[in-house]
Each structure stands twice: as structure tokens, then as C-alpha cells.
Image (spheres, rainbow, N blue to C red):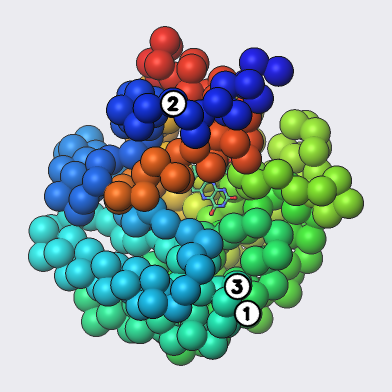
Amino acid sequence: MLNTLISRTLPFIPKKLVWQFSKNYIAGDNSSDAIAASRALNAGGVKVTIDILGEFIETLDQAENNKTEYLDLIRLVENSGIDGNYSIKPTMFGLLIDEEACYQHVRELVKTAREHNTFIRIDMENSPCVDPTINLFRRVKTEFPENVGLVLQAYLKRTYEDIENLLDLSTDELPLNLRLCKGIYVEPAEIAYKEYHEINRHFLEDLELMFKNGIYPAVATHDKPLITGAVELIEKYNVPKDRYEFQMLYGVTPKQRKSIVENGHTMRVYIPFGTHWFGYSTRRLKENPKMVSHIVKAIFYKG
Ligand SMILES: Cc1cc2nc3c(=O)[nH]c(=O)nc-3n(C[C@H](O)[C@H](O)[C@H](O)COP(=O)(O)OP(=O)(O)OC[C@H]3O[C@@H](n4cnc5c(N)ncnc54)[C@H](O)[C@@H]3O)c2cc1C
């Protein structure tokens, strides 16, 4: 109730005040902020994946601009010696307006990533995006097998089957690279698990399927029981350290992140930045009021 109330009033709260909430989770307005945040994390043995904020665009001109921004970012970051890669949201390149145009933009980004020997992860957005995003990934992955990965969401009932259907793209030398997360959008109960334990059970089932089939999973969670469950699976399948990684969001549960790194696991932090931080923050909070309690908690209780 309180969460919903706070999230509804957010659009009327001054931008400066929203920034007070958001700055813990967003590196800043521009690429120098993202590079500074990346350097600090790299210094602590943590890799990064950098994301320019922006999604669900309305015109293809915006898609073109977004691609240019990413191309500039890739060149800048690759010249800065940062240990990291990139995350992109397909609706930022027009996925829901013109799938072919979106494919051409993403293809150009991944081609540039290959030229720099780096990697781009395609984030997963809400459920209408899932089929077109998987199709987009398939096309790009076939051409650039080493330079692109996908995200799947454990709360979707279809995900186990989606993993099985993607197995034809995975080989021992070039395993599929899939980030597994719970999923952040509010989805209907017909297609998504809703209950905490149910989502967690499916998360671990999906992860086990990945390990059994030699997929390289990026285990994206801050949830302690899931981290413990993932470590148990890593031990059960004797997975080498270079065949998986953990991922967390910038600013979230840094103590937990540190302990995973100290235990010798690879950790990558997702760093969002950009001028669209205000819209992004308020939209996220409106979409999922539970986030408000995370933010309030993070403000009063660091780590
Ligand atoms: C690297 C990364 C990439 C992601 N990419 C996507 C994507 O492409 N598509 C998508 O739908 N979702 C994505 N997500 C979000 C994900 O789906 C979850 O919504 C989010 O990670 C919270 O789930 P959790 O597994 O941490 O578990 P929860 O049960 O939600 O959280 C467990 C605990 O972690 C802490 N916590 C979690 N989130 C926060 C927060 N924001 N602030 C403060 N504390 C927090 C709290 O202490 C909470 O009790 C991504 C998450 C990560 C880490």
C-alpha cells in the first residue's frame, strides 16, 4: 500500500529528490560516469556490463541515435582498458516498431563488438518482447557466435522450454551464454509464476538445465537462497570457474557481492547510466512498487 502510494506520487516529486534515490543505482548522466564506476569496480576484482538507459522508443530516428550512442560508448570503453562488456534493450532499437530495423542496428553493434573482441548481452524486456527478442538473438548469434548473449527470466513459465529450444546454438567450444534472472516486469499469472518460492524453484531448475547442457550461465540475483543454490549446483556438476559467472546490479547488496568475489567466483556488475535516468527510475518504480521498499531499505541499510 505504502509502496504503491509512493510510486504513484513519484512523477510529481522534484527531479533532484528522485536523483537522491536513483544515484545509488545509476552511475550518472554520461559515459565518463560509467567509466569511473567501472574503474572502481574493476579495482575490486569485479567485471562490469554497461547499459545506456532508454527503452520503448517511439520513432526509428531514436533507434538510429541510440545505436550511435552505443557505438561511441563501445569505442570509448574499449580504449579505456575497462574489463567489461555491454547490455542492450532491444526496444531501444525499435523491436516493437520494426523488427528488421532493430535487427540491423543490433547486428551492427555486435559486429563492432567482434571487432573489439568484446561481447553484447541482449536484455529481456516484458512478455510481448520475448519471441521477437529470441528471434533477434538467434539471427545475430548465428553470425557472431562469440560476441552475443541473451537474458531469460525464471518467472516466465515458458523459460525451461526456451532454454531447451536454444540448445542447438550451443557447442562445447562456443557455449550459449545466457543470463538468468527472476524477471522484473509485472506479468499475468497465466504466463508467469508469481510466488517467491515457485520462482526460486524454477530459477534453480533452469540453472541446472543450463549446467547439464554446458551452457555458460550468468547467475543474476541478489537473493541469498538462490546464490547458495547456484553454488550447490556448481559443486554438484563440478563446473570450472571459467564456465559461469554471477551478476548483480550496481549499488545493490555490495556486501554479498564482495563475499562472492572472495569465494573465488567471477562477478559482473550491471552499470546503467544516461540522461534518461529520471524516466527509467520512475517507470521502474511505478511498474513494480516492491522496488520502493528495496530502495528505501538500501538508503537506510547499506549492504
Ligand atoms: C545483472 C542483472 C541483470 C538483469 N537483467 C534483467 C533483464 O534483462 N530483464 C529483467 O526482466 N530483469 C533483469 N534483472 C532484474 C531481475 O529480474 C530481478 O528483478 C532483480 O534482480 C531482483 O531479483 P533478485 O533475484 O535479486 O531477488 P529478490 O527476491 O527480488 O531480491 C532478493 C534480495 O536482494 C535485494 N535486492 C534485490 N533487488 C534490489 C534493489 N533493486 N535494490 C535493493 N535491494 C535489492 C533485497 O535485499 C532482496 O531482499 C536483472 C538483474 C541483474 C542482477
Q: Is residue 23 above or below residue 75?
A: above
Q: Which residue is mark 2?
A: 13
- CA separation in Å, label 2 and label 3: 30 Å
On screen, residue 212 above or below 12: below
Looking at this view, is 278 or 221 the one in front? 278
Q: Position of residue 255 (x, y in %)?
A: 38, 22
Q: Is mark 3 within 8 Å of ligand 1?
A: no
Label 2 vs 1, first from the N-terminus: 2
Residue 286: image location, x then y, percent? 59, 36
Q: Residue at x 15, y 64 (%)?
A: 76
Q: Residue 260 at what x, y percent from top left?
A: 41, 33
List x then y, in percent, for residue 192. 80, 49
In the rendered image, is residue 61 in sight? Answer: yes
Tag 3–tag 1 contact (CB < 8 Å)? no
Residue that mark 1 sits on: 135
Q: In the current view of this chain or complex, which residue is farthest to the top?
A: 300
User: Which residue type does callout 1 highlight?
Assistant: Asn
Taking 213 as reference, is 247 above or below it?
A: above
Question: Disc 2 versus disc 1: distance between alpha carbons?
Answer: 39 Å
Task: Determine whether the residue tagged by mark 2 lies in a helix, strand or loop.
Answer: loop
Q: Amino acid at mark 3?
A: Leu
Q: Is mark 2 within 8 Å of ligand 1?
A: no
Identify the residue under disc 3. Answer: 96
Give the SS element for disc 1: helix
Residue 233 visible here:
no
Instruction: Kindly indicate the quadrant of the structure image that contains residue 212.
Output: bottom right
In this rendering, which labeled residue sits more in front, label 2 or label 1? 2
Mark 3 burial class by Cα count in 10 Å: few <14, some 14-19, many 20+: some
Of the four image quadrants, the one with ligand 1 is top right
Mark 3, mark 1: which one is toward the viewer? Answer: 3
Judged left or right of residue 65, residue 299 is right
Q: Are the residues at dot 2 and dot 3 in contact (C-beta closer than 8 Å)?
A: no
